[in-house]
Image (tube, grey):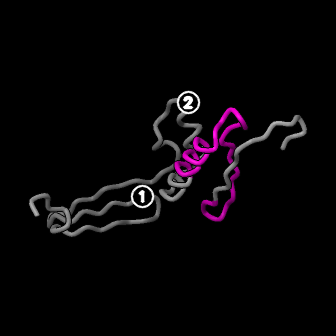
Amino acid sequence: MQPSGAKYWRVNVRRNGINTTLSLGTFPETSLADAMAEKLRIRGQARMGIHPTAARRAAREGTALGSAGVAFSIALSAAGALSITVAEQTLHLSRYQTDASC
């Protein structure tokens, strides 16, 4: 609770070893269900390597999320294998896993 008496829904997010506390809204204007949904969305962004504060800033300013510092690349080899890289994690799929006719 704040000295003014305001109560906030908050979430702690740990990304790259750094803790960040974000406000999800004030009580009672923001319901518990809305705060929980927002918490799940923010934690999902953090798992994908998106900094939650940068994502909020990009949404507020109307800029693209890619400018929020997310490294993203897709590569398709001549053999049909697909590699998707998000931040520092890479997913490799073989030609058989990417074939839509299977």
Residue that label 2 marks: 61
Which residue: 64% across, 39% down? 31
Q: Position of residue 28 (x, y in %)?
A: 71, 35
Read off the magenta span: 14-42
Secondary element under disc 1, as helix, strand or loop, is strand
65 horizontally vs 94: left or right: right
Q: Residues within 10 Å of mark 2 (few under 14, many from 20)?
A: few
Which residue: 35% across, 55% down? 73
User: Compared with residue 95, is residue 50 higher up or lower down, i.e. above or below?
Assistant: above
57 horizontally vs 67: left or right: right
Q: Position of residue 94 (x, y in %)?
A: 21, 69
User: Compared with residue 90, is residue 31 higher up or lower down, i.e. above or below?
Assistant: above
Residue that label 1 marks: 86
Which residue: 68% across, 53% down? 20
Which image quadrant for residue 53? Answer: top right
The residue most toward the left is 101
Secondary element under disc 2, as helix, strand or loop, is helix
Which image quadrant for residue 77? Answer: bottom left
Q: CA distance from mark 1 to mark 2?
A: 23 Å
Which residue: 25% across, 67% down? 93
For the N terminus, the quadrant is: top right
31 horizontally vs 94: left or right: right
Q: Is residue 20 magenta?
A: yes
The residue most toward the right is 3
Q: Please, what is the three-letter code of the amino acid marked with disc 1?
A: Val
Q: Earlier in the sequence, mark 1 or mark 2?
A: 2
For the C terminus, the quadrant is: bottom left
Q: Please, what is the three-letter code of the amino acid marked with disc 2?
A: Glu
Q: Residues within 10 Å of mark 1 (few under 14, many from 20)?
A: some
Q: Is residue 50 magenta?
A: no
